[in-house]
Amino acid sequence: MSAPIETDVVIVGAGPVGLFSVFELGLNDISCHLVDILDRPGGQCAELYPEKPIYDIPGYPEITAQGLIDKLMEQIKPFNPTFHFSQMVESLERLPDGRFGLTTDAGTTFRCKAVVIAAGGGSFQPKRPPVAGIEAYEGTSVHYAVRRMDDFRGQDVLIVGGGDSALDWVLNLQPVAKSITLLHRRDDFRAAPHSVDQMRALVADGKVSLVIGQVQSLKGDNGQVTAAVVKDKDNNELEIACTKVLPFFGLTMKLGPVANWGINLEENLIPVDTARFETSEPGIFAIGDINTYPGKIKLILCGFHEAALMTQAVYKIVYPEKRHVFQYTTSSSSLQKKLGVL
């Protein structure tokens, strides 16, 4: 395990509210790292409805979910945030010096002064496909996320699914894998049209195999898959040789390890005050859809408001000896320098 990462704040969740927190914290010289179980920024927006229009973001009469994430990523670029994708915070403890220690399921450890939970409705958990005995291969040759592309170098990879994650990894892994087979139950895909077009071009060039059908079972020993038994669209049974399987069957939302962090919960939501958005545990904050308080409305714009107020409280933790001077980006030359506009 590597040495702990030292930072002011760890943000759990890289959805729109988590991303805007980077901006608010950065304006106040507060450093942060973000951890997200997904393999990209954006949370629900990027994973579940990237091309769905959103109509209630101030200043944008209409913007797609992915378009909003792209704009937020552009906005926080001056602060150079560090992301830790495809990881979930498994443990959190208060250290003797008053800070927090966090460890992810990938073994990444942090030491920080405050924790911000911006995990939407909770942790995204991949749905396990209905294949008997698949558990025996999980973590060895069946994976629900790509942590390192090199793990798939020279492998025969079977990717199952028809959404953005499935298509993205077809395109990203094709140059490094020995072979790529995409399996989907129908010849119609929910992914971005340009990704589908790129996939079909690779299929036409013989660089990717496309099979319409569903996995029935897996073959292999000691956790290593050697083939998938598939029933095709004509109800014929065939075997697809593979050494790695990536099923993308969607996600379920669970509170996950957050439930074990000693924070008061209310029907799987985290109660907070509306001045600081702090939980029952001092120094741990919750913003966005995961929190609850009288009058709570689950809107992205409300989460942005919560991030701004949370930042004011976190500043007092990070800089206890300093008096916070509130400034406007429209008139503060020091803030404009941080944003790179001066």
Image (cartoon, helix red, strand yellow):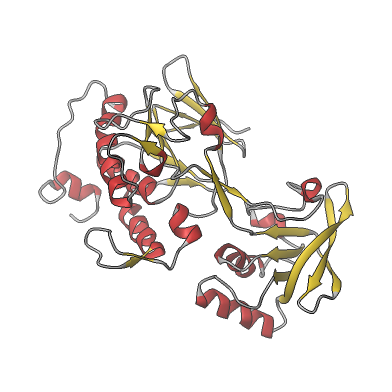
Please indicate, yes or no, whether residue 178 appears anywhere in the rendered image.
no
Quadrant of the rendering where the C terminus is positioned: bottom left
Q: Is residue 181 above or below residue 114?
A: below
Quadrant of the rendering where the N terminus is positioned: top right
Q: Where is residue 213 in the image (x, y as percent from the top left)?
A: 74, 72
Count of numbered badges drawn on the protein = 0
Q: Position of residue 61 (x, y in %)?
A: 25, 67
Q: Position of residue 214 (x, y in %)?
A: 75, 67
- Residue 291 occupies quadrant: top left
- Residue 202 occupies quadrant: bottom right
Of 125 and 292, nearer the camera is: 292
Q: Is residue 255 left or right of residue 214?
A: left
Name, please, the residue furthest toward the left.
Answer: 331
Name the residue located 56 percent from the left edge and 40 percent from the top edge.
88
Q: Is residue 292 above or below residue 121?
A: above
Name the residue located 28 percent from the left edge and 46 percent from the top edge.
302
Name, please, the residue furthest toward the top.
Answer: 96
Name the residue located 31 percent from the left edge and 32 percent from the top edge.
277
Q: Is residue 257 above or below residue 216?
A: above
Name the residue located 24 percent from the left edge and 47 percent from the top edge.
338
